[in-house]
Image (cartoon, grey):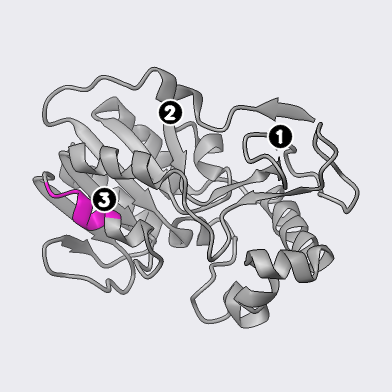
Amino acid sequence: MERVPPWPAWLQSPPTYEPGRLLVILTGAGISAESGLSTFRDSGGLWEKYSIYEVATPEAWHRNPQLVLDFYNARRAQLASVLPNPAHLLLRELEKYYTVILITQNVDDLHERAGSSYILHLHGELTKARSTIDDNLIYHIGYSSIRLGDTCEKGAQLRPHVVWFGEEVPAYGIAQRWSERADIFVVIGSSLQVYPAAGLLDEAYRAKRKFLIDPKPTITQGVETIAAPASEGTKRLLELLI
C-alpha cells in the first residue's frame, strides 16, 4: 500500500486567480448518479437498502466492522466499473475560463478521473483507507477491498477513509475559506440536506452569482436555478458563463 498525505497536494501551493474569475463548485451524489453510482436519498437509493446506523457511523463500525467493510468494499468494486460522465468532463472544460475549485461531498474518484485540477473531498475518499488509531496514516488502495486483519504500519486495523455520520468534517474549514472567496458559486447534484456541507452556500456571501443545478431544486431564493440533471444543467451553466 502506498501511504499518502492527509491533504491534497495543491493546498501546499494554492492556485492564483484573476479578480472575478474564481469559480467554486459544490458537487453531490446527483453528479455521479449519471455514471451509474447509487445516490443515498433518492427513491431506490442506498439508504432504502441499508440503515445509516448499520454501515455509516462509528457505532456501526464498533458493533459490526465486517458489515461496514462489506458495504464499502461493494461500493469500491462498483466504482471500478463506471466512468466520469459529461458533467464531470464539462467541469474540467470550465478550467479554460476560470480557476475552478471543486468541493465534493462524494467519496468517488470521478472528478479526478475527469481531469479536474483542484479537488477537495469533504467526506473522504473511497479509494483510500486509514488507520483506526492515527488519522494521519492514510493509504491509497484503489479499488481493492479492505479486510479484517489489514493493518496500518502501527499494527491497527484499517478502516474506510470516509467521514461517517457523527464524525467531524476536517476539510470543512478549508472549504469554507474557498467558498468565502468565490466570485461565482455553484451547487450541482446536492440535496443540501447534509450539514455542514449545505452551509457552504451561505458562506459564499461575496459571490456575485450563485447557481443551483438539480432536477428538483429545493432552494430558489438567492440562487439562479437550472432545473435539470447534472450533465444537461452543467452544459447550460457552461453556456451562461463563457
**Observer-nearest residue: 158 or 202?**
158
4 to the left or right of 124: right
Q: Residue at x 57, y 75 (%)?
A: 45
- Which quarter of the figure has residue 211? bottom left
Quarter of the figure that contains the N terminus: top right
Q: Which residue is mark 3?
A: 186
Q: Amino acid at mark 1?
A: Tyr
Bin the neighbour count of mark 2 within 10 Å (Cα to Cα): few under 14, some 14-19, many 20 and up: some
Upstream in sequence: badge 2 or badge 1: 2
Compare residues 163 and 81 and report the one nearer the observer.
163
Residue 161, image x and y in percent?
64, 47
Q: Is residue 152 above or below residue 42?
A: above
Q: Which mark is residue 139?
A: 1
Say what amino acid the circle numbered 3 marks: Val
Q: Give the quarter of the image for residue 179.
A: top left
- The count of marks equals 3
Q: Residue at x 62, y 34 (%)?
A: 136
Numbered range of the magenta stretch: 200-205
Q: Looking at the image, is 197 positioned above or below residue 140?
A: below
For the residue labelled by badge 2, is the local secondary structure a helix, a strand or a loop? Answer: loop
**Residue situated furthest right in the rendering:** 149
Magenta: main secondary structure equals helix
Q: Is residue 61 left or right of residue 169?
A: right
Kind of residue at disc 2: Ser
Mark 3 closeness class: few <14, some 14–19, many ≥20 residues within 10 Å: many
Q: Are marks 2 and 1 in contact (CB under 8 Å)?
A: no
- Bin the neighbour count of mark 1 within 10 Å (Cα to Cα): few under 14, some 14-19, many 20 and up: many
Q: Which residue is mark 2?
A: 117
> Could you tell me which residue is drawn at 68 percent across and 39 percent down?
134
